[in-house]
């Protein structure tokens, strides 16, 4: 700050005609305060530089430690990956067991149940559909056999169930007529002639 600027500043604060001593005292005071602030700032800068140097040194040491331990970290990462894969495999097996239990409740067990899983351990819908279709066919066949079991054989006894008379109705009628004709006297026979 120049003397002229100091003079104007003193006028602005109420001193009408500042003397040279007042201007010098003012300048000394302003420069003194500025120097104090500069010193304070320099100390802060110096402190920050020292801290930055320490941080830089600590970073170097940390990098050296990390590089030295990198193989250990790699080992730990590999072990973690192996453990995660094993966990995934076990979860898949658990899911497969749950599905097998559900299938067992529906009567699908053993080889049929094993065929239902693909290589990933997921349920194979096409194989399930085939098993269901085969079961429906087997059930229909069993029902047909059951129905046919109670149906009489038409070749052996004329289509009648065991114990029934094998003669057709028209043959029975003819026999009745013949019986009547042989057991009646002649005038009754004329009445019943065909």
Image (tube, grey):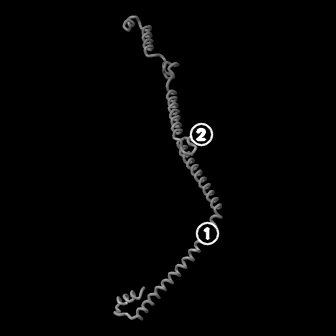
Q: Based on the displayed image, in which of its 4 quarters is residue 27 positioned?
A: bottom left
Res. 60 mark = 1
Looking at the rendered image, the quarter that the N terminus falls into is: bottom left
Residue 80 horizontal/vertical position (percent): 61, 57
Tell me the crowding category of disc 1: few under 14, some 14 to 19, or many 20 or more residues within 10 angstroms, Cα based: few
* Rendered residue at 64%/67% (across/down): 64
In x, y percent, where is residue 75?
64, 59
- At x 61%, y 69%, the residue is 60
- Within-10-Å neighbours for mark 2: few <14, some 14–19, many 20+: few
SS category of the residue bearing label 1: helix
The foreground one among 161 and 174 is 161
- Residue 171: image x %, image y %? 45, 13
Q: Nearer the viewer, mark 1 or mark 2?
A: 1
Question: Which sits in the foreground, 137 or 156?
Answer: 137
Residue 36 shown left or right of residue 11 in the figure = right
Nearest the eye: 32 or 66: 32
Of labels 1 and 2, earlier in sequence is 1
Image location (x, y in percent) of residue 115: 57, 40
Q: Say above or below: 96 vs 174.
A: below
**184 in relation to 15, above or below:** above
Q: Quadrant of residue 173?
A: top left
Q: Which mark is residue 111?
A: 2
Q: Which mark is residue 75?
A: none
Label 1 to label 2: alpha-carbon separation: 63 Å
Element on which disc 2 rests: helix
């Amino acid at each position: 700050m120049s003397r002229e600027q100091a003079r104007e500043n003193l006028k602005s604060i109420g001193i009408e005609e500042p003397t040279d001593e007042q201007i010098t005292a003012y300048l000394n005071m302003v420069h003194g305060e500025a120097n104090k602030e500069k010193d304070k700032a320099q100390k802060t800068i110096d402190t920050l530089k020292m801290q930055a140097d320490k941080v830089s040194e600590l970073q170097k040491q940390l990098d050296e430690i990390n590089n030295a331990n990198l193989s250990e970290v790699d080992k730990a990462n590999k072990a973690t990956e192996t453990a995660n894969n094993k966990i995934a495999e076990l979860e898949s097996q658990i899911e497969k067991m749950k599905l097998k239990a559900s299938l067992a409740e529906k009567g699908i067990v053993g080889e049929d149940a094993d065929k239902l899983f693909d290589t990933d351990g997921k349920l194979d819908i096409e194989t399930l559909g085939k098993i269901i279709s085969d079961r429906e066919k087997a059930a229909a066949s069993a029902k047909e056999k059951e129905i046919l079991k109670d149906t009489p054989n038409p070749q052996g006894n004329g289509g009648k169930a065991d114990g029934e008379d094998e003669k057709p109705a028209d043959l029975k009628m003819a026999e009745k007529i013949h019986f009547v004709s042989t057991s009646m006297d002649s005038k009754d026979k004329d009445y019943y002639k065909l």
